[in-house]
Image: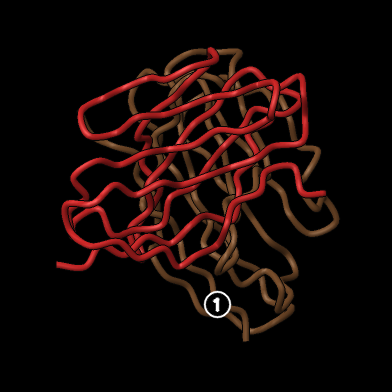
Chain colours: A brown, B red
Amino acid sequence: EAGVAQSPRYKIIEKRQSVAFWCNPISGHATLYWYQQILGQGPKLLIQFQNNGVVDDSQLPKDRFSAERLKGVDSTLKIQPAKLEDSAVYLCASSRLAGGMADTQYFGPGTRLTVL
Amino acid sequence: QKEVEQNSGPLSVPEGAIASLNCTYSDRGSQSFFWYRQYSGKSPELIMSIYSNGDKEDGRFTAQLNKASQYVSLLIRDSQPSDSATYLCAVIVNNDMRFGAGTRLTVKP
């Protein structure tokens, strides 16, 4: 079974530029999560999708971050415009079941973003 | 008070020893608890989940949960150098998974 795929693996941009990350979850997984992990900290949930609907985006900075999951499969996370404090690893995870964060989450390799 | 607190370490143990990792949480209503391992530069991977008070064993790993004390721990028996990693405690809070900052473990040969 293929794991969670993410691209790009690394991205360097200047502040105020835009950037987009892509995630392909494990086939058949209903729930998809985007996390931000700043160096030295644990992952912080940004948004949770169940199929193609948003379940929780309470910690997503909506003035600059947006995310979508079209057709309930792939997802993109966009930052526009980027700030220095957005430098972090962006992790995508998926879980098989719908409707519960208690389900096992499988993480992708992450995208390391550096904002200069 | 942080929602999930861990000692950042580093924790250093000799090969073959027992490593003890601790985590406290603030939400008394939390019901689901997880331990993830994260190697440097890699993504987290689930080691164990625990939902009931007491101990849960899986191979060399034992998770311990005490809801009255709001405390969850992970014991690693017969520690190996390959166990050197950051261990993240995660707790479901208001239907969101909250992670601690992690404890960095080094197992010395």
Q: Position of residue B88 (x, y in %)?
A: 49, 47
Q: Residue at x 65, y 27 (%)?
A: B92
From this view, report whether residue B58 is shown above or below residue B14.
above
Q: Position of residue B16 (x, y in %)?
A: 16, 52
Q: Residue furthest right?
A: A63
Q: Position of residue B59 (x, y in %)?
A: 20, 28
Q: Position of residue B61 (x, y in %)?
A: 29, 33
From this view, report whether residue B20 is shown above or below residue A53.
below
Residue B51 shown left or right of residue B91 in the figure: left
Q: Residue at x 53, y 12 (%)?
A: B52
Q: Quadrant of residue B62?
A: top left
Number of numbered tags placed on the structure image = 1
Chain letter behind tag 1: A
**Foreground of the two, B35 or B22:** B22
From this view, report whether residue B47 is shown above or below residue A100.
below
Q: Quadrant of residue A17?
A: bottom right
From this view, report whether residue B79 is shown above or below residue A111.
above
Q: Residue at x 56, y 67 (%)?
A: A40
Q: Disc 1 marks which amino acid? A: Thr
Q: Residue at x 58, y 42 (%)?
A: B23
Task: Classify mark 1: helix, strand or loop.
Answer: strand
Residue B53 shown left or right of residue B41 in the figure: right
Q: To which residue does mark 1 refer?
A: A114
Residue A99 shown left or right of residue A31 in the figure: right
Residue A52 shown left or right of residue B81 in the figure: right
Task: Sort mark 1 into few (<14), some (14-19) or many (20+) by Cα contacts within 10 Å.
Answer: some
**Foreground of the two, B9 or A71:** B9
Image quarter of the C terminus of chain B: bottom left
